[in-house]
Amino acid sequence: MTKLFRRKLLKFFVYAAIVFSAYIIQTTPGLFDFFGIQPILVLPACICIAVYEGEFAGGLFGFFAGLLCDSTSETVFGFNALIFLVFCA
């Protein structure tokens, strides 16, 4: 592995850890609960990644973050993934 590939792999691993930690914070019951409404923290994190890395990497992170949000939502599976993909691309 080259040094550049290793650095890029580490960078995307850190991005995935940030998105996953935002998801954990977002889905923790009672944390950041304002009058029964919880904020969506994963989408802004993915949009920040998309702005910094470009539309392809942002779209992939948006899609997988949407799949994470679909696992806990009551909508059709894949709905949030498509919406996050569009917002991040």
Image (spheres, rainbow, N blue to C red):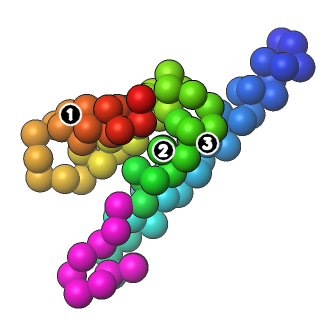
Range shown magenta? 31-40
Alpha carbon distance from label 2 to label 1: 17 Å
Residue identified by numbered label 2: 46
Quadrant in which the C terminus is drawn? top left
Alpha carbon distance from label 2 to label 3: 9 Å
User: Which secondary structure lies at badge 3?
Assistant: helix
Residue drawn at x 81%, y 28% as measured from the top left? 7
Residue identified by numbered label 1: 78
Foreground: 81 or 83?
83
Is residue 11 shown left or right of residue 72?
A: right
Which residue type carries mark 1?
Gly
Graded by Cα atoms within 10 Å as few (under 14), some (14 to 19) or many (20 or more), the crowding at tag 1 reads some
Which residue type carries mark 2?
Cys
Residue identified by numbered label 3: 15
Residue 82 coordinates in the image, percent (x, y): 25, 32
Residue 72 coordinates in the image, percent (x, y): 24, 53
Residue drawn at x 34%, y 32% as measured from the top left? 85
Quarter of the image holding residue 70?
Answer: top left
Alpha carbon distance from label 3 to label 1: 21 Å
Q: Residue furthest right?
A: 3
Graded by Cα atoms within 10 Å as few (under 14), some (14 to 19) or many (20 or more), the crowding at tag 3 reads some
Can you tell which of label 2 and label 1 is closer to the viewer?
Answer: 2
Which residue type carries mark 3?
Tyr
In the rendered structure, which disc, 3 or 1, sits on the residue that comes first in sequence? 3
Residue drawn at x 30%, y 72% as measured from the top left? 38
